[in-house]
Amino acid sequence: MSDRLTTSPSFEIIPLKGIEEKLSALPSGASVTVTASPAKGTKATLDLAAEVHRLGHETTPHLSARMIADQSELNDVIDRLAGEGINRVFVVGGDADEQGKFKDALELLRAMEELGHHFQTVGITGYPEGHPFISGDQLRQALIDKQRHATYIATQMCFDPRAIVTWARGTRVDAVQLPIRVGIPGVVDPLKLASIARRIGVGASARYVTKNRAAVWRLLRPKTYRPTKLVRALEPEQDALNLAGLHIFTFNQIASTVAWLRGQR
């Protein structure tokens, strides 16, 4: 197993009830991202990010464009994160109904630069299997436009290494040279994984999960499924495509994923 992909992964967690009790399973000084949930609001993301940061982890809250009403609220968010000592963010368009000034991630990134910010690391999203509501050409142009405001790309969750490699090669053809953190599922409960996959729309992978539930139980149940084969399939391409590491969707099942990582080392 490649050290480059597995040594310094980022762990994505969701601001849901009970997550605080699970944080002790994180490795010391872990890289942790906190998602933005339309149901919970931006404050829930910032509150959890602050708690994770106080525990000594490298913390990256998601900033969702459609969940931030205007520049005044954006300024408040930036000020709060500066006060907490958090200098990393991940900027997304988000799944919330459009309700404020910023319709997508690019608009929010531009507004952040206009206001001025202290963030040393800014992540943006890549879509190896496309997006259910945005065309491939639009996604390509958006990535080209966003790269000047960002320091890395983290991809949406994908189960197909061929899709990841094909997409990553395409970004390099488009002269997008940002390092890529590959979004993969952790060791998670299959029903939760299927539910999340359907909701975020990961193309063929989501359709497979939905239509082949029996196979999912065999392949993705916590006692047998590991993302080992997926990661190994990416190893030959990591240097050429600048695959900088893993971005692991834990769905708050941190302990099982951390145990898997330790086993690979």
Image (tube, helix red, strand yellow):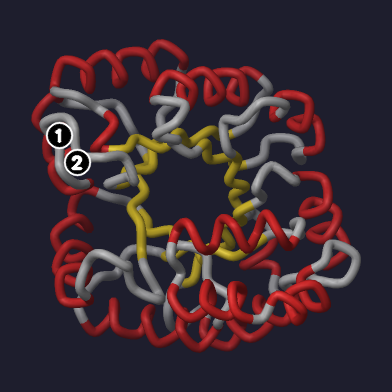
* Viewer-side residue, 68 vs 52: 68
Which mark, residue 109?
2
* Viewer-side residue, 179 vs 224: 224
Mark 2 vs mark 1, foreground winner is 2
Secondary element under disc 2, as helix, strand or loop, is helix
Image-based side of 203 in relation to 176, left or right: right
Q: Amino acid at mark 2?
A: Leu
Image-based side of 26 in relation to 96, left or right: right
Q: CA distance from mark 2 to mark 1?
A: 6 Å
Which mark, residue 113?
1
Residue 67 picture quarter: top left
Residue 94 picture quarter: top left
Percent position of residue 219, x then y: 78, 77
Residue 32 picture quarter: top right
Residue at x 70% of width, y 75% of height: 213
Residue at x 25% of width, y 40% of height: 97
Residue at x 76% of width, y 40% of height: 27
- Above/below status of 70 relative to 169: above
Q: Label 1: how many residues lie within 10 Å, few (<14), some (14-19) or many (20+)?
A: few
Image-based side of 101 in relation to 204, left or right: left
- Above/below status of 191 relative to 108: below
Q: Amino acid at mark 1?
A: Glu
Do the CB atoms of the residues marked 2 and 1 lie less than 8 Å apart? yes
Secondary element under disc 1, as helix, strand or loop, is helix
Percent position of residue 9, x then y: 62, 54
Q: Quadrant of the C terminus?
A: bottom right
